[in-house]
Amino acid sequence: MRWALVKVCVAVTTMVVVAFAVPLGLVIREMARDRAFSNAEREAAAIAPALSITTDRAELERVVASAASDAGMAVHIPAGGDSGGSGATGGAGGRQQAVDIGRQRAADKDIAMTRKLGRASTTEVPGGSTLLQPVALSSGEIAVVEVYVPEAEVTNGLGTAWAVLAGVGVALIVGSVAVADRLGVRMVQPAQRLVESAHELGEGKLGARVPEEGPTELRLAAVAFNSMADQVVQLLANERELAADLSHRLRTPLTVLRLNAASLGDGPAAEQTRAAVAQLEREVDTIIRTARDAKPQTAAVGVGVGCDAAEVVRERMDFWSALAEDEGRKVRVAGVDRPVRIPVARADLVAALDALLGNVFRHTAEGTAFAVDVHNGEDAVIVLVSDAGPGIADPRAAMARGRGSGADGSTGLGLDIVSRLAESTGGDVRIGRSVLGGTEVRIWIQLDGREPERRGHRGAVRRRRPATLVSTFNRSRSLP
């Protein structure tokens, strides 16, 4: 916008300068020409009194020499009439001979035409122009005074005047550019601040606001943006309060469930039930504390944030293995014999694994085997959860948040939790057919901290995977 305003002002100012400067330059040229010929007319007028008194050559030469500033004047007196006792005579009537004083530059026909018409005229000659001024003699004849006007005299001062005019035009254009630039800055800066605040709000900085300054339209846009941001903060606060209130309502049935579990006595089933109730209570408390927090929660990916994926997998498999043993399920765990650091918070990885393993127990029959594999590479880690169940008929629909079938109690949020975990590191989630014959959920966790790439649909990215990790992963799938 800023450069657009500058270009518009330059174009408009240039047109105005040209519209005024060109006619003014032509007027200046005509004024210079009129000045030069006015001087020539004054010089010719100075000879007229002498010609009306005498036509003697010697007298006229003295008058011409005193009246003309240079050798640019000539006098042409025709032959005829009585000499009146002056000048050379010839014939019985004493007729006077033609007299020419000075250098003649004009053509004879032009001089004759001026004498015939009896009015002044100008004619072009080599090096300039001549002014032909007719003067009536006492004998009734018409003499012609020729005044030479050089081209340099006609254009004297014209170059300086045009240069001054051009300088004024350039100064006007430069001034308009400066004014347009200041106006552009006054308009662009508020717009840039509006864009920056919008980006900050999109990044989760809910305190981003726009100063209400600049043109009227931008001030109104700033007011609307600030009002929208305040409303977003209020809506988020209401949502957090609602989540906290709903979670708090679960404490009453949890208390009853905990008391009932305490009365079950001893035994593996009782211990598992009490452990599940305790974990559920901890999760509810975590939800309440998170919902009450005034700061928005964002994915924690960066220096100093992460966990050991192998340790988390071992811990969660110990928990789920007890339930799997009761249902007669075969369990296999691989790749957790050494630490595997990933840039994911421990609680997030626990939630993702519990979501996937809970789906296995919820959507497959008792006795269905499942496995969890961890593959560690130089720049990525793959966590693979597979089962021997019937599989997922439409993986794309399963990856869409909230599109569970409803018949089996599925909400679709579990896979969304897993997907957001992977995408926070720049990775993704793929659903396919496992080597066990059922569903395979592959979580790709990027280790280099790159920004998530644009996706055509959830769970699919356009990126070439590292050849080393892909080959290792493919080989491991073929192992029994």
Image: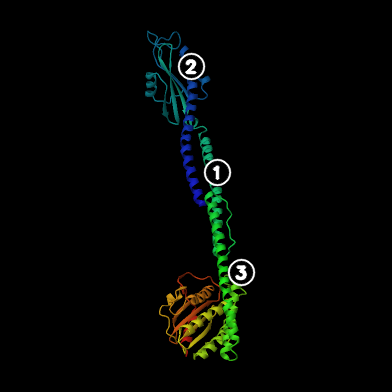
Q: Secondary structure at mark 2?
A: helix
Between marks 3 and 2, how big is the CA–CA gap? 115 Å
> Mark 2 or 1, which is nearer the eye?
1
> Mark 3 or 1, which is nearer the eye?
3
Look at mark 3 in the image and give the residue it sits on: 293
Q: Secondary structure at mark 1?
A: helix
Between marks 2 and 1, how big is the CA–CA gap? 60 Å
**Does 86 sit above or below residue 174?**
above
Point out residue 293 in the picture as x, y percentages from the top left corner. 61, 69
> Mark 3 or 2, which is nearer the eye?
3
In the rendered structure, which amino acid carries the disc numbered 1? Gly
Q: Are marks 3 and 2 in contact (CB under 8 Å)?
A: no
Look at mark 2 in the image and give the residue it sits on: 60
Between marks 3 and 1, how big is the CA–CA gap? 55 Å
Point out residue 199 in the picture as x, y percentages from the top left corner. 54, 62
Among numbered discs 3 and 1, the one appearing first in the sequence: 1
Name the residue: 52% across, 75% down: 417
Look at mark 1 in the image and give the residue it sits on: 175
Closer-to-camera residue (289/422): 289
**Does 225 sit above or below residue 441?**
above
Residue 313: which quarter of the image? bottom right
Name the residue: 49% across, 48% down: 7
Q: Secondary structure at mark 3?
A: loop
Among numbered discs 2 and 1, the one appearing first in the sequence: 2
Point out residue 69 in the picture as x, y percentages from the top left corner. 52, 24
Q: Residues within 10 Å of mark 3 (few under 14, many from 20)?
A: some
Name the residue: 49% across, 77% down: 415
